[in-house]
Image (cartoon, rainbow, N blue to C red):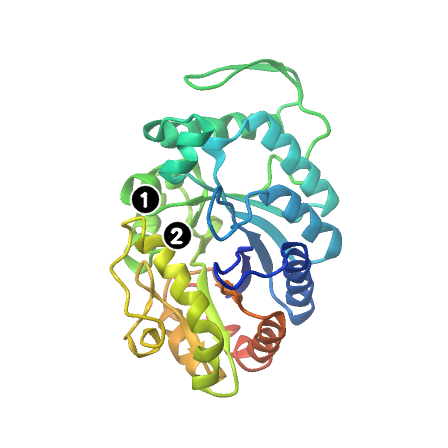
Amino acid sequence: MDIGLAIAVRNLPGKPQHLPSLYREFLAEAELAEQLGFDAVWVSEHHFAEDNWNSATLPMLAAVAARTERVRLGTYVLLLALHDPLRVAEDLTGIDLISNGRLDIAVGAGPMEVECKVFGIDKNEAFGRTYEALEFMQRCFSEDGPFTHEGKYYHYPNVCMRPRSVQQPHPPIWMAAMGPQSIQRAAQRGYHLASALHSPLWKTYAGQLEAAGRKRSDHRVMSGPLLVHLAPTRELAWDEAEQGMHWCVDFYNRRGWTAPLPPVGELRRTPDAGIYGIPFAVGTPQDVVRILGRYREEPLNQICLQFRAPGMEYACVERSLRMFAAEVMPEMRRWGAQA
């Protein structure tokens, strides 16, 4: 099973960290992940968040590309409906060139309501815009001669994108899907699946691929991202991570997407505490192997892990990453995706 690192640059309100330093630390985390044997680094996108969630996904990904040599690089997720797809295709091509063909594109069709409103996008159109933009971008990456796109949402005359991406006909495309309709569309179009949920949807995807006449072996499934933190003792791990992880859940709770939370200090005693039913993996290396072990028999090709909750000091994150690589990663390498 491949193991990916998720990057979400976020500050903890009430415990702010110097943002330029925070960005440099996340770049250092990506470099360390490559050195420790991680397979991919994924950068997220959100806008106007009170915790300064990174909104400039592609510049951040380009910076990671320039600092690494081997690891795959991806957007997880790119909120494509908010952007000009021609401009995005050009910027992604630049990252694929900088990285010598290491780019993956994971796209989400569900920006938050405030994001759509400020960008002037009807939220009800986000799904349609996303899939039309992807179809157009695939042509940008692959077509030699000029073409014209006349769609419902986008209109481009005489497009002939130069330079071309290293990966042809285009970099791998993943769809972040949370429901049956998105999973069906991803399978029909041959996109890989990145889903925050678990077994039922992953298995639905396999069935939809078969219905579309596609081979499961040609398509990949990725989890998460799951929040992870390791320390020599379970108590220390929770002491270092609980406040930031509580904030991560509360971020969604205040938008009506998750159930109410116990207070900080009680989260560690809440069974299967996490986001969208995905439990936090917090504790000793043995604890983390046990918690992540529930994914051992799932039809996953990659598990995506986030090691830094808002407010955590980088020294704690680095220690956690090194412990994971030494004591958890070897066990996970023996796990294989089940068709």
Q: Is residue 267 above or below residue 92?
A: below
Judge by depth and name the residue closer to the eye, 55 or 110.
55
Hey, which quadrant is residue 312 in on the image? bottom right
Residue at 41% over, 62% down: 247
Hey, which quadrant is residue 39 in on the image? bottom right
Residue at 39% over, 37% down: 114
Q: Is residue 133 above or below residue 249?
A: above
Which secondary structure, mark 1? helix
Furthest residue toward front: 14
Judge by depth and name the residue closer to the eye, 170 or 99.
99
Judge by depth and name the residue closer to the eye, 149 or 336.
149
Q: Which label sits on residue 179?
A: none
Characterize the local packing of mark 2: few (<14), some (14-19) or many (20 or more) Cα atoms within 10 angstroms: many
Which secondary structure, mark 2? loop
Q: Amino acid at mark 2?
A: Ser
Say whether disc 1 or disc 2 marks the residue closer to the N-terminus: 2
Q: Which label sits on residue 208?
A: 1
The residue mark sitting in front, 1 or 2, is 2
Residue at 70% over, 58% down: 70
Q: Amino acid at mark 1?
A: Gln
Marks 1 and 2 in Cβ contact (< 8 Å): no
Image quadrant holding the C terminus, namely: bottom left
Q: Is residue 139 above or below residue 64?
A: above
Q: Which label sits on residue 195?
A: 2
Is residue 213 shown to the viewer in this render? no
Residue at 61% over, 28% down: 87
Characterize the local packing of mark 1: few (<14), some (14-19) or many (20 or more) Cα atoms within 10 angstroms: some
